[in-house]
Structure formats: structure tokens, C-alpha cells
Amino acid sequence: MIDIAELVYAARRALANTYVERFYLRGQAKQAFFDFMQKDLERSLEWLNKRNEEDWNKHVTIKEDGSKALESSWFKYK
């Protein structure tokens, strides 16, 4: 889970750096397309962060022998 948190952090930093690129774009069509892509990336990153903060242990069952197994709800969650 720490690796995922670091990935989200790195993605946020990379996304923040792209705002500078938008400043230098010339042309309204290019800027509009860039804004569209930026908004989609922001939405996806927020979704990923929300999923990362959820308790995924509720999708795991512990068998009698102590091993863990994924429930079918995991595949819907994922």
C-alpha cells in the first residue's frame, strides 16, 4: 500500500508540472484539448486516491487454516 501511495504522490507531482506546459501552448484549440485531457487525468487520479484510502480488507476472508482468500466482491471493487 505504501508503493501505491508513493505512486499517487508521483502522479500528482507530474500532473502539477504539466500546468506549466499549458501556459506555453499557443492556440485556443490546443489549450481546450489540453484542459480536457488535464481534467480527465485529475478525475482519474482522484478516483485512484479514493480507492487507495478505502479499506480493502473487507473483501478478504480468512479460511480455517489461516490463509486468506479474495471474495467475489474484490473483483467488482478492483
Image (cartoon, rainbow, N blue to C red):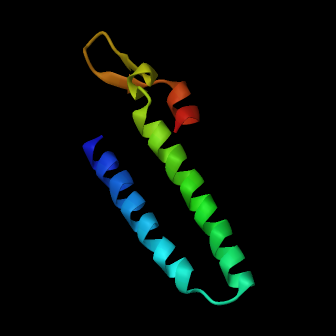
Residue that protrudes farthest toward the top in the picture: 64
**Looking at the image, which residue is at 54% across and 26% down?**
72
Compared across the picture, whether 78 is left or right of 68 comes to right
Give the image location of residue 55, x and y in percent.
41, 26
Quadrant containing the N terminus in the rendered view: top left
Q: Position of residue 71 (x, y in %)?
A: 48, 24
Q: In this view, does 2 lie above or below 39?
A: above
Closer to us: 54 or 46? 46
As drawn, is 40 to the left or to the right of 77?
A: right
The quadrant holding residue 65 is: top left
Residue 23 x/y as whole percent: 54, 80
Asked whether 64 or 20 is in front, the reply is: 20
Camera-side residue of 57 and 26: 26
| In-image side of 13 versus 41 (left or right) | left
Q: Residue at x 64, y 69 (%)?
A: 35
Quadrant in the rendering for residue 56: top left
Residue appearing at x 55%, y 26% in the figure: 73
**Residue at position x 28%, y 21% in the image:** 67
Residue 54 in the image, given as x and y percentages of width and height: 44, 30
Q: Nearer the viewer, residue 8 or 17?
A: 17
Residue 41 position by quadrant: bottom right
Outermost residue toward the front? 23
Judged from this view, the residue extending furthest toward the right is 29
